[in-house]
Image (spheres, coloured by chain):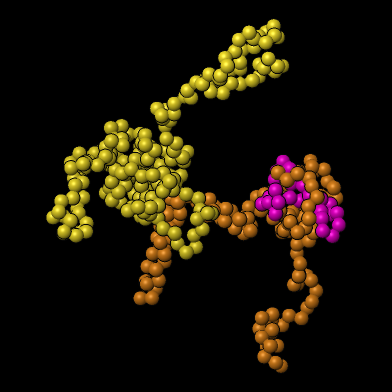
Amino acid sequence: LTDLHHLNILLLGTFTDHSTNTMPTFTRFVEVGRIIYIDYGDDAGKLATIIDIVDQNKALIEGPEEITGVARQVISFRRVKLTDFKVSICRNARAKTLKKAWTDADILKKWGETNWAKKIERKRKRESLNDFERFNVMIAKKKKAHIISKHMKQLEA
Amino acid sequence: MTAGAENWRVYGIAGPKKALPVDKSGKSPKYYPADDIKRPKPSRKNVHKPARVRQSITPGTILILLAGRFRGKRVVCLKSLPSGLLLITGPYTLNGVPLRRVNQAYVIATTTKIDVSGVDVSAISDEYFKRDKASDGEGEDEFFLGDAPKPAIVSEARRADQKRVDEVVLGVVGKTVNLKRYLKARFSLKGNDLPHKMKF
């Protein structure tokens, strides 16, 4: 056996089962009810749901408008990123049905708990800091580093 | 007069523009002067509007000085003077900046503000900072001594005013956590800073 084969075994174990159940390759699908994150355009930064699929490149989406502010519209998949969340609706669901599905599934709360959403919020927060806030962050970082180094010295001793 | 004469304006008349009086009967007026009467234009010399200061700069705003001896220092703006300059103070014990005038063009106004309503700077104006003629004259001896920096001669009145103003300002500064440290520190751009994206 070559070295590369040894390396593969080390990394993957003795994996030989190719069924999707044990090692799924894709989990986020373009489907009716998939929650998406809009990356580009007027509604950039907002969540929406796929209500219907137009063709290979476009889908009909809606907020629901009352929850996320995204109106019912056709959008290209290039402007959009798929999230882990899904809502069970029928194709072309009414706004009212969609809104109920969203509130039942508590999507906004679940989204807020994801690392993705937290990263977005962290980035937004950092960009909005004013000079005094940035100064306070610097002080806090120094304090944290001081505490850590103190503990490290104690451990090394 | 031709039709539409009521809309004609006569130039050279001071004050709000008025149309020529039109004869309501529609006939030409019997008399009008051969030459246009020249009226003097309104004098602009004695009309002084208050100097315009940026909206972001108000009394109590923390400013970052960008040029001059105290560049990079964060100071407190006390008020805007009639000349258009801003009156600032360090406070002196924190960063060495005394009561001073500064041009708003060389200043970044941060959004951090403190309450300086308790500070009385009504007596300080542009006159306060005028140079004394006597101390300016350079004698022959001084000329031959060279360009050694002369120690600043600060009058007792200045010291007293500085102390009086700073006492109040320091009291307010002490109320916010880290604000004293903030005013002591100098502002500088680090390697990863993008000033056009920074909010102040």
Q: Residue furthest bottom?
A: A1
Res A53 quadrant in image: bottom right
Q: Position of residue A153 (x, y in %)?
A: 37, 72
Residue furthest left as drawn: B141
Percent x, y for residue A78?
Answer: 75, 59
Q: Quadrant of the N terminus of chain B?
A: top right
Q: Residue at x 51, y 58 (%)?
A: B194
The residue lying toward the viewer, choosing from A84 and B30, is: B30
Colour assigned to chain A in the rendering is: orange
Residue at 26 percent of width and 39 percent of height:
B130
Residue in view at x 37 percent, y 71 percent:
A154
The foreground one among B165 and A85 is B165
**Residue B27 appears left or right of A53:** left
| Chain identifier, colour yellow | B
Where in the figure is residue A115, as x and y percent of width and height? 62, 59
Position of residue B81 in the picture relative to residue B158 (left or right):
right
Nearer to the camera, B136 or B17: B17
Q: Magenta residues, as a range?
A: A40-68
